[in-house]
Image: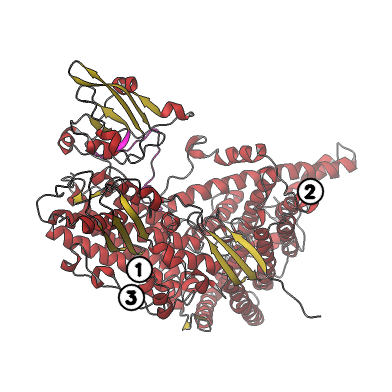
């Protein structure tokens, strides 16, 4: 008698330790092999896009903090850039540099979280996670020093940043940047040569460049597939055209490449911060912009290279104090659309790792 | 003659013979199980504290001095928790599973010698008994997976069976080398036959046994059946209360037993200079256990197919080769002189290096240099962290100073300066500032001011909006209440509250404030 197996549907989430929030996957698998998968999201939907339509342009800045709450500074930046495009506001030089420093620190912090959580998904018992948190903590300390908050910064303002950095900020930042490179090397020791990590991630969940482009995937995930596309270079915003940095790209587009690209990007970010610190000019940090702004009729789109990918804000103004339309192009959501293609045919444990390597933030996926 | 037999012989002079033979084992069992539980508690404590230090945390340190009572507190919690049986689960199977999982782990100790003659029963088939008994616990795990009627549990049960069957074989085969040398299955003779610790004489056998044993007791990197990040908790996902406690206890008892077996088979059991035998034995057991959780805190988990491949392609053939080599050595040098250890270590190293070359990971040939060094570097890194200062703090006693610009709760309101313009209320993105004004002698006077701190998100926009510098963020970061209404601050409370304004939006206030506690303060002081 031939043995027959029957596919089983398992529901992962919305409450599951490895779904990085309230995400749900309905996985059908045969033995341990995934034959079908249906991602379901919307459990964290707060209607931020609609809420924003009844708030003024300045009042919306704290709301953008709550999109990708692991990269609030980047969200702030993309949003205020959109409003500045809409209203045609020039930003003081010093503010631009501060924005770049904050955005790059935020990238390091977000990548630290991504890599630490990925290792946790692979089954490391919180140790890499804790080391990552320790480093991230130092960045949060810096942010707290500047804007008084550790998670929801609300630091960028339309036409600049809310306040100048305190005098102890630059020495502390310098120490952090100096130590960060050493930490990344040390961390590489723990993991990058570890056979178990390689076995779990090499060749797992390959995202071909073609599929990545067709699915409009962006950020480290796209670069891991070998596409050299970074908005900081492709469409330079703020003062990014003044810095010298490389865009690391992967070869295969597998989980290991996605991990590796993030590690390399942290190194590049420290380079950018270093250069920005050296070039930081004196002067005003905030243009004279009223707190209640009424941009002229029209529409504007601004996009930045957020830690997770291309983050864009599309705003339509109808000449009132509130945006008529507020649309977020959230990288997490769009990167997540390839999840099913990546996971099919892999094992249950791989699905978790592939999902972790996409690095999403549910606050941004569901909005 | 063992202590137990001596006790029996002595007792038979005074008591009827049936009582003299029945009572001593019961007494011994009571003592032994108490001792095991105490050691298991020590294990749990050491592991939690140890992993804490590997992860630059403090670890549990609240219950009792240095947190030593933490396992006791956990036990009390587990005992008083509600016991839940899944509605559609198999009641009896669910109920029996934790017992079946726990008892065999306890039964292993019947043949574990703690010192000269300090053994419950010196069976002449001691090691065979251990192998037979320790596989029984798997049935309990499988029953738990089946009886819970939960798919995660079922996946876990499936993995358990596959993993245990695979790892049982190299586990048993790796012992045979030891048995060839000693020529006995009895645990006592194995200890007494170790003129050199067999770790040195049987390095390959030791490695295989250690890895297979780690898989047997589900320690990382082989903890697939619990796999927190995949199947949440696996087989015990539907268990609560003391039934979960039994699984937990069983796991650690099993870990104790396996560490003890490693200590007996490969580290020379109780033998050692100067210290009393039982102490030597415990030192060895704890060292083995510490290595186990050191691995746990460093390595990620294998995937199920890699796990099986490791057992069948790597451990199993190497164990066979080990038996073969030991057999040849037994013919040539029947006494196994200690000089043989040099040869054996060389053979083991050569075999591991050669064998690893057979494997491919993602199309690349595995090289021992890379993976051996990679794992060793990782272990060295976590080890170094043991001696670093933990980054977590004892919260209520030890407080960090927040940033000078901290946006804390409880806005500081300067009633003198406020002219009731309501700019703050208009600016608030979530409209929680309720302010009513009346016309007074010198312009507007605030009659009512209410701010709901249960909803406030501390964005600081109200402070920035205030045109007369009457509103400040505060540097307090603690606020808690059991009732939402109490979080609504009223005008009188604002006036009466202690004023600790923060420099948010008012950088000129920064000068007299204490500096922020930083994890990495800038070099050379502030």
Circle 3 or circle 2, nearest the eye: 3
* Of the pair A261 and B5, the residue shown nearer to us: A261
Q: Disc count in the image?
A: 3
Tag shown at residue B70: none
Q: Is residue B510 visible?
A: yes
How far, Cα to Cα, is label 3 from label 2? 72 Å
| Circle 2 residue | B5
Q: Residues within 10 Å of mark 2 (few under 14, many from 20)?
A: some
Q: Residues within 10 Å of mark 3 (few under 14, many from 20)?
A: many
Q: Where does the image place residue B118, in percent across and percent down from the top left?
A: 69, 50
The answer to whether marks 3 and 2 sit on the same chain is no
Q: Is residue A151 visible?
A: no
Tag shown at residue A249: 3
| Callout 1: chain | A
Q: Which residues are magenta?
A: B386-409
Tag shown at residue A219: 1
Q: Residues within 10 Å of mark 1 (few under 14, many from 20)?
A: many
- Position of residue B212 in the picture relative to residue A121 (left or right): right
> Residue shown at 26%/64% (left/top)?
A269
Circle 1 or circle 2, nearest the eye: 1
* Of the pair B303 and A76, the residue shown nearer to us: A76
- Dot 1 falls on a residue whose secondary structure is loop
């Amino acid at each position: 008698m031939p043995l027959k197996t029957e596919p089983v549907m398992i529901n992962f989430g919305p409450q599951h330790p490895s779904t990085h929030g309230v995400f749900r996957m309905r996985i059908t698998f045969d033995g341990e092999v995934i034959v079908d998968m249906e991602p379901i999201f919307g459990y964290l939907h707060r209607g931020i896009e609609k809420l924003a339509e009844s708030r003024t342009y300045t009042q919306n800045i704290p709301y953008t903090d709550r999109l990708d709450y692991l990269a609030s500074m980047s969200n702030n930046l993309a949003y205020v850039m959109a409003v500045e495009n809409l209203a045609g506001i020039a930003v003081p030089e010093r503010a631009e540099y501060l924005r770049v420093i904050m955005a790059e620190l935020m990238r390091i912090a977000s990548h630290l979280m991504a890599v630490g959580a990925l290792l946790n998904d692979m089954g490391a018992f919180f140790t890499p996670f804790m080391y990552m948190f320790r480093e991230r903590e130092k960045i949060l300390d810096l942010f707290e020093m500047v804007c008084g908050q550790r998670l929801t910064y609300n630091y960028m303002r339309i036409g600049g940043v809310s306040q100048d950095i305190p005098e102890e900020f630059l020495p502390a930042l310098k120490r952090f940047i100096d130590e960060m490179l050493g930490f990344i090397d040390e961390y590489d020791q723990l993991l990058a040569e570890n056979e178990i990590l390689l076995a779990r991630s090499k060749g797992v969940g390959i995202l071909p460049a073609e599929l990545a482009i067709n699915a409009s995937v962006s950020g480290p995930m796209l670069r891991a597939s070998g596409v050299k596309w970074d908005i900081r270079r492709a469409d330079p915003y703020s003062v990014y055209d003044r810095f010298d940095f490389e865009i690391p790209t992967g070869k295969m587009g597998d989980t290991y490449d996605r991990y590796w690209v993030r590690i390399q990007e942290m190194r590049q970010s420290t380079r950018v911060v270093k250069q920005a610190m050296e070039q930081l000019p004196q002067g005003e940090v905030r243009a004279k912009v009223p707190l209640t702004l009424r941009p002229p009729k029209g529409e504007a789109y601004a996009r930045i290279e957020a830690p997770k990918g291309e983050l864009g804000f599309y705003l339509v103004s109808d000449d009132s104090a509130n945006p008529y339309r507020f649309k977020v192009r959230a990288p997490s959501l769009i990167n997540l659309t390839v999840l099913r293609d990546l996971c099919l045919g892999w094992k249950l444990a791989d699905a978790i790792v592939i999902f972790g390597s996409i690095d999403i933030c549910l606050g941004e996926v569901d909005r | 003659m063992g202590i137990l037999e001596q006790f029996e012989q002595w007792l038979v002079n005074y008591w009827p013979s049936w009582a003299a033979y029945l009572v001593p084992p019961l007494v011994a069992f009571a003592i032994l199980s108490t001792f095991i539980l105490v050691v298991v508690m020590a294990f749990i404590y050491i592991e939690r504290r140890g992993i804490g230090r590997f992860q630059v945390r403090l670890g549990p340190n609240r219950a009792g001095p240095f947190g030593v009572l933490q396992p006791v507190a956990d036990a009390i919690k587990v005992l008083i928790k509600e016991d839940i049986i899944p509605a559609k689960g198999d009641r009896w199977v669910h109920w029996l599973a934790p017992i079946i999982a726990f008892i065999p782990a306890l039964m292993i100790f019947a043949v574990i010698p703690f010192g000269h003659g300090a053994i419950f029963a010196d069976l002449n088939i001691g090691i065979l008994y251990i192998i037979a008994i320790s596989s029984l616990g798997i049935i309990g795990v499988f029953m738990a997976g089946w009886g819970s009627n939960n798919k995660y549990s079922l996946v876990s049960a499936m993995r358990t069976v596959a993993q245990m069957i695979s790892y049982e074989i190299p586990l048993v085969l790796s012992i045979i080398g030891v048995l060839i040398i000693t020529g006995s299955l009895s645990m006592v003779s194995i200890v007494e036959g170790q003129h050199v610790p067999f770790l040195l004489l049987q390095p390959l056998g030791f490695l295989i046994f250690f890895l297979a044993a780690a898989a047997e007791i589900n320690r990382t990197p082989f903890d697939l059946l619990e796999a927190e990040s995949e199947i949440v908790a696996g087989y015990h996902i539907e268990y609560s209360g003391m039934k979960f406690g039994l699984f937990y206890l069983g796991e650690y008892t099993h870990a104790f037993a396996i560490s003890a077996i490693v200590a007996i088979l490969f580290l020379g059991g109780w033998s050692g200079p100067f210290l009393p035998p039982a102490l030597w034995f415990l030192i060895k057991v704890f060292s083995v256990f510490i290595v186990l959780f050191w691995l746990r805190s460093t390595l990620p988990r294998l995937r199920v197919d890699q796990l099986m491949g490791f057992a069948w392609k790597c451990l199993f053939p190497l164990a066979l080769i080990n038996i073969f080599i030991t057999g040849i050595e037994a013919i040539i040098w029947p006494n196994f002189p200690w000089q043989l250890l040099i040869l054996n270590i060389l053979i083991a190293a050569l075999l591991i290096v050669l064998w690893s070359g057979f494997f491919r990971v993602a199309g690349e040939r595995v090289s021992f240099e890379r993976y051996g060094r990679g794992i060793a570097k990782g272990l060295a890194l976590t080890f170094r962290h043991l001696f670093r200062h933990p980054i977590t703090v004892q919260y209520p006693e030890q407080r960090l100073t927040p940033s000078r610009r901290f946006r804390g709760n409880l806005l500081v309101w300067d009633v003198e300066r406020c002219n009731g313009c309501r700019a703050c209320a208009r600016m608030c993105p979530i409209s929680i500032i309720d302010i009513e004004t009346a016309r007074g002698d010198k312009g507007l006077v605030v009659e009512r001011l209410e701010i709901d701190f249960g909803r406030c998100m501390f964005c600081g926009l109200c402070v920035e909006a205030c045109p007369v510098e009457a509103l400040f963020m505060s540097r307090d970061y603690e606020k808690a209440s059991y009732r939402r209404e109490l979080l609504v601050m009223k005008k009188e409370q604002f006036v009466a509250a202690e004023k600790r304004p923060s420099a948010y939006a008012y950088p000129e206030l920064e000068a007299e404030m204490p500096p922020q506690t930083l994890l990495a303060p800038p070099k050379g002081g502030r």
